[in-house]
Amino acid sequence: MRKKRWLALGLMLLLVLSTALAACSSDEKDDVKGDDKGGGEKKEKTLVFGRGGDSVSLDPIATTEGETYKVTENLYEKLINFGEQDTTLNPGLAKSWEAAEDGLSYTFDLQEGVKFHDGTDFNADAVVKNFERWMNGDAEKFPYFKSVFGGFKDDKSLVIKSVKADGDLKVVITLKQPQAPFLKNLAMSPFAIASPTAFEKFGDKFGDNPVGTGPFKFVSWKRNDSITIEKNPNYWREGLPKLDKVVFRSIPDNSTRLNDLLSGAIDLADGISPSDAASIESNANLQLLKRPSMNIGYLGLTVTRPPFDNVKVRQAMNYAVDKQAIVDAFFEGQAEVAKNQMPPVIGGYNEDVKGYEYDPEKAKALLKEAGYDGKEIELWAMPVPRPYMPDGKKIAEAIQKNLADVGMKSKIVSYEWGVYLDKAEKGEADAFLLGWTGDNGDADNFLYALLDEDSIGSNNYTYYKNSKTHKLLIEAQTEVDEEKRNEIYKKVQEIFNEEAPWVPLAHSTPLLASKSDVINLLPHPTGSDRLENVDFK
Amino acid sequence: MSEMAPNATIDVVIKQDQSVGPWREAWRSFKKSKAALVGAVIVAFFILLAIVGPFFVPEGINDQVLKNRLQPPSAEHWFGTDDFGRDIFSRVVHGARISLWVGFSSVIGSVVVGSMLGIIAGYYGRWIDTIISRIFDIMLAFPSILLAIAVVSILGPSLQNALIAIAIINVPNFGRLIRSKVLSIKQEEYITSAKAIGMKDARILFSHILPNSMTPVIVQGTLAVASAIIEAAALGFLGLGAEAPTPEWGKMLADARIYLINAPWTMIFPGLAIMLTVLGFNLMGDGLRDALDPKMKN
């Protein structure tokens, strides 16, 4: 009897204790959240940004993935910045720059008095060390460096010849051959300048301990949950940033994220379903923000895997998919149907490419011609909403039906986002949904980055190889004359259209929504937003 | 020999009593409960729907007409259309077959496996009982849906694997039920006498113990069908059950989630279907328990 009483007492105690603890934890949350409306007061201004997925790393050079850049764009800075809502070139960590006549060398004048978050100085030496780090890497470690600058230290294809400091605040970069989009490339999120002291100290763990010069400092990272960054009090631009803290929360489900915005748990959400646009616009507490479109959503066909090693099957896929119906249904008009591998805003877009109309009969005929054996294929669908595709699984289901109509059976497969990218990169998918948001507004960043043989192992998941387009794409990189360059890209698009390594689906207008008191947020076409000007009313 | 004769006749008399009396009495008391009858009618309706329904519905399960997406209920589409322009009525009817199939076959699977283990544990006792019972305890220590998720993630998501997972998680429930029943039956005199006349274990188990321990299993089984349907729907909702475009009710709910505000009918009808079948099985199960459980008689 006594034993039982003690047990009951113990249980009661546990109950009380757990209630108390639960109460504490919710208090804590409230503290973190702070008071958004306390504009002029001393209270912390915290912006909670809800997004579809977690970052892969916080070292921007270690990945090619957009969720990483969304955060790192605010932790680090690059030598050159893009314009507020376009890809024009503006001063960043470099005050000014000058290109030599022959296009083979560039001289950068750096900002004075900039310090990294760890207190070390930003100077020419730091820039040189960053380039050395990148050039000494490999495709595994720095995938984007290879596809943008052609290779690493020992590769002939590496465009950069040398990076040298000239005094404390001047850097000279010499190239082996001209690279037309060189300055645009330097303005891309992955090529942000990190603290050499920090990356030497942390080595492979630098992605968990990011140190840059940006307006915000890293605080903490709970995997698959949230990343917290706070104001850098020593930021070199006067009066910035306006916010004290930003919390990036990953909320994979679109409707959950919208509900969190409605309930006030988050202040800003990206990846808004097009179907929710109307209800957000009619809500006085919310505002709908449109990101200028610079992307492509596509169905990749891995050309090393049957049946897609046959060009006729790939063309049949293009005829089989009813793109217009998909755009109408799942983008709700917030997108245009794609026919090329890059969006029309990019210079060099080929209007004259015919593309493939929806024609199941032609698809059937082509499949027959190709001798397709009726083998079931795997159709990979993204597990998370992406700016170029709000709901991959639904689109996959529509495509599955399209394919069934022409006699191709498919099984929809999905993995966790990191695994999905990893497996697709290794060429393990038959057909996969994916997309790309331009990182610098140049055709090279679409056509070469996504479909050239040099990009196999980084962003060319289809393993498509073609010596003709490879030659043209390399030629375009060194061609400084804009018009001639565009002509080359047009030719490349014609060949891609014929060879059909993808079914291009749509160029979407990604939607964001925020509380109506969030001001100065200008969504950037690259998908990575700088938040230093953002404020609460 | 002369001693055995009276015992045998007593055995026969007891048997007769059990085989005629209790069932009729059970049916009488089942009929008395209105709720149980309603449950039985609902269950019968859904079983009929599952068997013949799919032959009469207007559309197949994957007749996409994207132009007609998200249309409200009308004369043409009784339950409206979903986001692929498919007829929800047709899909819900097809879904009945899937849900009931999962419900019944997973429960039959767990009854068979659970009974075997339970009988062995209860009849033989000792170390074999300890092992089996501890395994059951371990399985019961996990929340059932968590265990199901674990099983599915090992086997890979598909309707068949969801079915297997649900069958596995229900095994200890039936196993323990049978074991306790066997423990009490084992002490009965007719078992002792059966042993005394040299009857083989197998025969004692299957012709005496098993039939006499089935009543609680029937009750528990009916209720388990209801929870199996919910578990299958939950797995489907989490994307761990049926694959697209299978019209499994839970998956239909998950797919319709984002249209909750704009097109509520995409959620309401599959949701109602789940609710009604589960309600039916639960009412019927409750009625059966009252009717079959001797403890509830007074």
Image (tube, coloured by chain):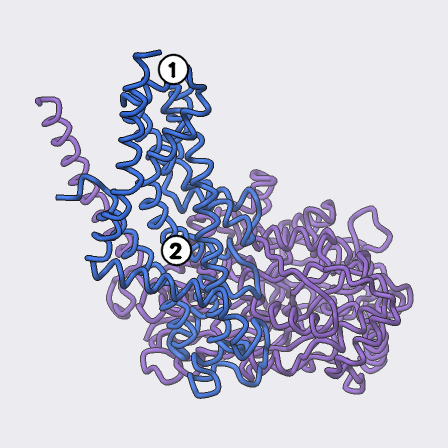
Q: Chain of mark 1?
A: B
The residue at which mark 1 appears reads as B197
Mark 2 residue type? Ile
Position of residue A352 relative to residue A411, above or below, is below
Task: Name the image quarter holding residue A242.
Answer: bottom left
Q: Are marks 2 and 1 in contact (CB under 8 Å)?
A: no
Q: Residue at x 65, y 68 (%)?
A: A400
Whether residue A107 is visible = yes
- Which element is circle 2 on? helix
Q: What chain is the blue one? A: B
First in residue order: circle 2 vs circle 1: 1
Q: Residue at x 72, y 45 (%)?
A: A137
Residue A415 percent location from the top left of the image: 59, 53
Q: Is residue B199 left or right of residue A43?
A: right
User: What is the total number of numbered labels drawn onto the structure image?
Assistant: 2
Quarter of the image containing the N terminus of chain A? top left
Residue B119 percent location from the top left of the image: 40, 28
Q: Residue at x 34, y 62 (%)?
A: A46
- Residue furthest front as drawn: B2
Residue density around tag 2, few if under 14, some if 14–19, many if 20 or more, within 10 Å? many
Distance of label 2 from label 1 (alpha carbons): 48 Å
Judging depth in this view, the residue of A336 and A135 nearest the camera is: A336
On the same chain: label 2 and label 1? yes
Callout in the foreground (2, 1): 1
Position of residue B172 relative to residue A27, above or below, is above
Q: Is residue B99 left or right of residue A21?
A: right
Task: Give the number of the disc on residue B230.
Answer: 2
Judging depth in this view, the residue of B122 and B138 nearest the camera is: B122
Q: What chain is the purple one? A: A
